[in-house]
Image (cartoon, helix red, strand yellow):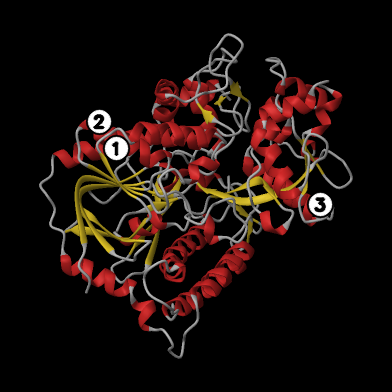
Amino acid sequence: MPEYQRHEHDVLVIGAGGAGLRAAIEAAHVGASVGLVCKSLLGKAHTVMAEGGVAAALANVDDRDNWKVHFADTMRGGQYLNNWRMAELHAKEAPDRVRELEAWGTVFDRTPDGRILQRNFGGHKYPRLAHVGDRTGLEMIRTLQDYAIYQPIDVHMECTIVSLLKDGNRIAGAIGYDRERGRFKLFSAKAVVLATGGIGRAYSVTSNSWEYTGDGHALAYNAGAAVQDMEFVQFHPTGMVWPPSVRGILVTEGVRGEGGILVNKEGRRFMFDDIPENYRNQTADSEEEGWRYTQGDKNARRPPELLTRDHVARAIMKEVREGRGSPHGGVFLDISWIRSKLPNSEEHIKKKLPSMYHQFKQLADIDITKEPMEVGPTTHYVMGGVRVDGDTQMSTVPGLFAAGEVGAGLHGANRLGGNSLSDLLVFGMRAGKFAAEYAGRQTAPRADTQQADDIVRVALEPFNRQGGQNGEGPYQVEHDLQAMMQELVGIVRREDEMRRALDSLKALRERARKVSVAGNREYNPGWHTALDLQNLLTVSEIVARAALERKESRGGHFRDDFPEKDPSYGKFNIVIRRGPAGEMQVTREQIPEMRDDLKRIIEENK
């Protein structure tokens, strides 16, 4: 067995996106010794792909906005399966976290009087998204990274964690490997914060980059932590669909927030056809009223394109299935139509949506100021994740914390656009603070070398199968997994298809146990894929089992065989744990009763 590069920290943060950076900064502020591990290079986090903005009730554009309205919007969007304590803290603390970013150097777009500008977004009652053009996530990472490198934080770049280590019931650290050389690293830590993002690479059409293989979800599950709400996968309504080389790349909701409309191949604006009852009084009933809303008219109602993402995605799929889609299996998103409304529309679009303009021009040879875009749903976000305490972000395993997309609770059954970036800031800060405080109360854990040796032995097995009888490579197994999940556990689900998915997962697991890789451990992407494959298989099975258990349609989970919402399913979360024999145990856990003052807020904002 190899010698390990050993590192000791009070707090180990796994993931260096918005949540991980904010957690590391806060843990360092508390006085903890902090290690920060990132799978790619520092600054290459998926947070940079977040374009539209960060949701916070600053009330800079509409003074009727406040934390109570934001709380009510978040709970309604999440179909009331949210951890209401997290939704309360998020709505209250997001404005301070945004102002903090501004103080650290984020260059937000401005109102004429110099305040942070905010834009409209789906599911938000008022303009609430503080933004930097359509590059908000990039600017956020730039700011956090620039601030973090001056803190006492040890950064371990291009390092993948393969397993967490435990000392009895509590977390003792983690073991990973250096992606460049293949050398193993043993991290001893009193507390670990997971900030690893989502599971998008379990699907074939996704906006997520290669890092999103469900690492944190699988690490937590394998360490004994509970995961919840994993049936709720968000399919963003608008990803690119043409050419094939860019299929799935995100088209920001900001296009619709600035006045973009969705039309089918007949040129008809189909989103007016089916407006949910609980949003009817907030939704415009004419093109003119919707346009006035996007231009800041406080008396106008929002256009139907700004309904929640789950609803818009299903409406697009309905047009495609019924033969009214675009030539390449999507619909048309048109911002160029505003030429009839604004004399300087080309300059306006380029100013408000610079990344989108260049993205379509360079990748699809389309000028969005003059012609519509072809878009369709793309796997974007998972609302479910590690079950955490609403205040501290600690999981059910002592010393293991989670923040950002890998943590569950805030978003319930469906996330509102823009809430993810404020989620990173609010709960990244809280996870870092409470992890450091927890670590300060602990003695140094015992990092069991035998435990680490066993993990490394399993990680190196693909090399030992090289040239054997069952020498299938990992890429084909990964491809087949993604295609199967897209087809059988995608936007529209049925029991018979999900049972077929579970059978397929069993077969895919057998194939994955036999994959072999050639070469050595240096610069070996085949080996990296073989290891990622184990996490993808784990999270795919969790999603399928949770989706089977929820026999209703709610938020990001749509059952064709149970198309209606069932009130009885609105009282619990579906929670999955690893059983003593390695089996998945699925349970229903009651959502705690909401405080009376928060109930009144929801009633007042209905």
Q: Is residue 465 left or right of residue 365?
A: left
Q: Is residue 372 left or right of residue 412?
A: right
Q: Is residue 116 left or right of residue 252?
A: left
Q: Residues within 10 Å of mark 2 (few under 14, many from 20)?
A: some
Q: Residue at x 39, y 77 (%)?
A: 462
Q: Residue furthest left?
A: 443
Q: Which residue is mark 2?
A: 29
| Mark nearer the N terminus (2 vs 3) | 2
Say if 445 sits above or below 290 in the image: below
Residue in the foreground of this view, choosing between 529 and 300: 529
For the C terminus, the image quarter is top right
SS class of the residue under badge 1? helix
1 and 2 marks in contact (CB < 8 Å): yes
Q: Residues within 10 Å of mark 3 (few under 14, many from 20)?
A: many
Q: Position of residue 116 (x, y in %)?
A: 53, 18
Q: Position of residue 240 (x, y in %)?
A: 69, 49
Q: Which residue is mark 1?
A: 432
Q: Is residue 10 left or right of residue 603?
A: left
Q: CA distance from mark 1 to mark 2?
A: 9 Å
Total number of numbered labels? 3
Residue in the foreground of this view, choosing between 292 and 116: 116
Q: Residue at x 58, y 45 (%)?
A: 555
Residue type at tag 1: Gly
Q: Quadrant of residue 122?
A: top right
| Mark nearer the N terminus (3 vs 1) | 3
SS class of the residue under badge 2? helix
Q: Please tell me whether mark 3 or mark 1 is closer to you in this view.
A: 1
Give the label on residue 325, or none: 3
Residue type at tag 2: His
Give the label on residue 104, or none: none
For the N terminus, the image quarter is bottom left
